[in-house]
Amino acid sequence: MQAFRLPEFYQPYPARLNPHVERSRAHSMAWSRRMGLLDVPKPGGGVVWDEAALAAMDYALMCAFTHPDCAGPTLDLITDWYVWVFFFDDHFLDYFKYTRDIQGAKAYLDHLELFMSADGQEPPEPTNPAETALKDLWERTVPSMSAGWRRRFITSTHNLMVESMWELNNIERGRIANPIEYMQMRRRVGGAPWSANLVEFAVGAEVPDDLAETRPMRVLADTFADAVHLRNDLFSYQREVREEGENANAVLVIERFLDCPTQQAAEIVNELLTSRLQQFENTALTEVPGLVVERAVAPHEQLAIAAYVKGLQDWQAGGHEWHMRSSRYMNDGALGGPSGLGASSLPSRLGLRRRFRQQSHTPFQPVGHLPVPDLYMPYQFRTSPHLGEARRYAPGWARRMGMFDPVPGLATGAVWDERRFIGFDFPHCAAMIHADAGPEQLKLSSDWLAWGTYGDDYFPVVFGTSRNLAGAKLCVERLAAFMPLDAGPTPPALNPIERGLADLWRRTAGPMAEPARAQFHAAVERMTSSWLWELANQAQHRVPDPIDYVEMRRRTFGSDMTFSLARLANWELIPAELEHTRVLRELETAAQDYACFTNDLFSYQKEIEFEGEWHNLVLVVENFLAVDRYRARDLVAGLMAARMRQFEDLVAHDLPALFDEFALDEPARAALLRHAGKLKDWMSGILEWHRRCARYTEAELRRTHPRPRLPLTPTGLGTSAARLTVGRT
């Protein structure tokens, strides 16, 4: 009996079948036999696969659906890759997940990775069928691809193999991930980024290497991956959760987090799948063309990007069709738009409902004060003894930078006045998040907080109300000149943002070594470019997709920049390979999310009622789940508690294991423990500052935020509501 009824799926693209499917069926069976993938014995008896099992799963059909236009030999190779990755998944399940053999799994994965050899390197002799097959595939694939593609493909393959340990550890401990952790880790362990790399190979068009890490191209790959994984989780819940005892499945994660029935959890996962597909479409249609123009991308590279986007669309359509047919999955009674070969891709009711809800929010609604619930915080804040000195200093610096001066064209005059600035009390925040800082360091930290917050307030009132995206982009582009990598002179500043950044860069980056300076430069740019993302959503009258919001919120809040500065202070003591480990990545993003969501809870009335904002997690949850703000508030608080408990778990269990895995010396261990301690101070200090700060009180909001001049009604794209001049001072 099925665990739930499959929901109605959003299917915007038609499925098509590659005409070479029969040759690839015959080829993949023969290749699997030759590589030794068939009749591999299980530890407890039986075999991982036999010919009948492989034929029933029909990976050649999957690849023919997901790569409908490639030539026969290319389809053969693509199919072999998928046969290998599914064999790896099932073999790993039988040998290591069921047996809970963590040490054996690590040794197996470490040796398997040696078969993705660099040019001039000879791989070792294979010791099992997975290694034999990977060696063969690598030698047949990489000669035709660029060095940049190989690097990306190695990273994706490494992630889907090595991050399997995360799944195994969770099974061993009976631990189910929280929703944010799950989406981040599923993207790495699930293999869809790897599939996106193979799309480049199949369509014969690589993403230009200098564009691969830009936001538009990264979002295309991430939304593709998330949609593939969420769809797979819906179809595979019965097998993975009910039959195999797996606990890495989005339906199960939502079921546990929301304490809701399985059917409801499946519907929510499908809503998220739809949202990710529509985020893909929005990025392809609004952000990619802008990137092409901005970078003056050559015509042949534009064609390559277009072929890649089309290849990802084909994969989504074909992947769904294969899930509907494969014996591997639960697919009785599946609903959706027109299905089958050549079926027209009419929008589903779900797709239309989701898009309408996302773009029908009414700004400036009188929501009133939103009481903040008790928030789980296990750490006690500390305060620097230099707070008084920093408080006396801070207004003078802001005044010298021009933050209290009138802004040309702004109806309300200045963005801030001095009374408002003093009420913000940035020195108090700095004194808690950097409790051990000396007097000058504390002043510098306070100034960075003031500068980042001023910029965050400046951009919506100067550029957002007039939809002047071109002016905002020019402003952001100019900021790079005030962060010279050689620590040299800067041009004359035209506004307080430029003046403040020039001063802060000189005081912060001047003493840094050049590589550290480059890293910090990139972190500041990530924050300032995120302000443009907010303005673009406002111009489109669009509440952000939940996953896109969470990931970009870390940038708009400035936490990405703050963490970069904290890491660079001790990073010479820590081996470089640790920077990209799961433990440190999750430790930092869990802390970031806790702090960002704290701000969203306290600033809800300020942003929704007084500023007409679209970027607040309470609003995003309201919009996505169609719940009231009180239920959304409680869910945000629940996410904060889940991320905090994950942080505690990482510090207690995963960090010591990381020390042993990399055989770290005492200075490196101490540096990582100090880093974790700073994150504790950072989270507890930010929470305490929000509790004390005047910025979010209703009395201060009514003093500093005049009402919109005209009544607002629900509006869509092309309306004039977003062009109203609304002060935020």
Image: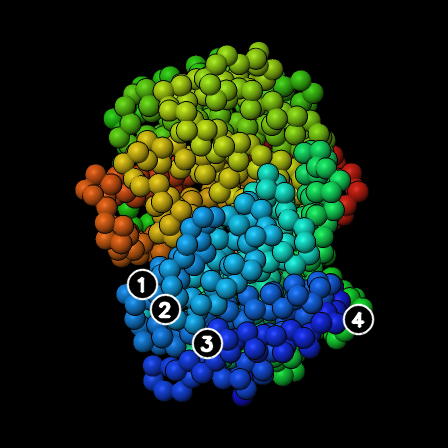
**CB-based contact (under 8 Å), mark 2 and mark 1:** no
Q: Which mark is residue 36?
A: 3
Q: Could you tell me the amino acid type at mark 2?
A: Thr
Q: Could you tell me the amino acid type at mark 3?
A: Gly
What residue sits right under mark 4 in the picture? Answer: 342
**CB-based contact (under 8 Å), mark 1 and mark 4:** no
What residue sits right under mark 2 in the picture? Answer: 127
Q: Residue at x 50, y 20 (%)?
A: 484
Q: N-terminal of the two: label 1 or label 3?
A: 3
- 68 to the left or right of 243: right
Q: CA distance from mark 1 to mark 3?
A: 21 Å
Q: N-terminal of the two: label 3 or label 4?
A: 3
Which x, y percent locates residue 227?
A: 60, 62
Q: N-terminal of the two: label 2 or label 1?
A: 1
Q: Is residue 304 above or below residue 247?
A: above
Which x, y percent locates residue 269?
A: 57, 66
Determine the secondary structure under disc 4: loop
Q: Could you tell me the amino acid type at mark 1?
A: Ala
Determine the secondary structure under disc 1: helix
Quick check: can you spot residue 70?
A: yes
What residue sits right under mark 1 in the picture? Answer: 107
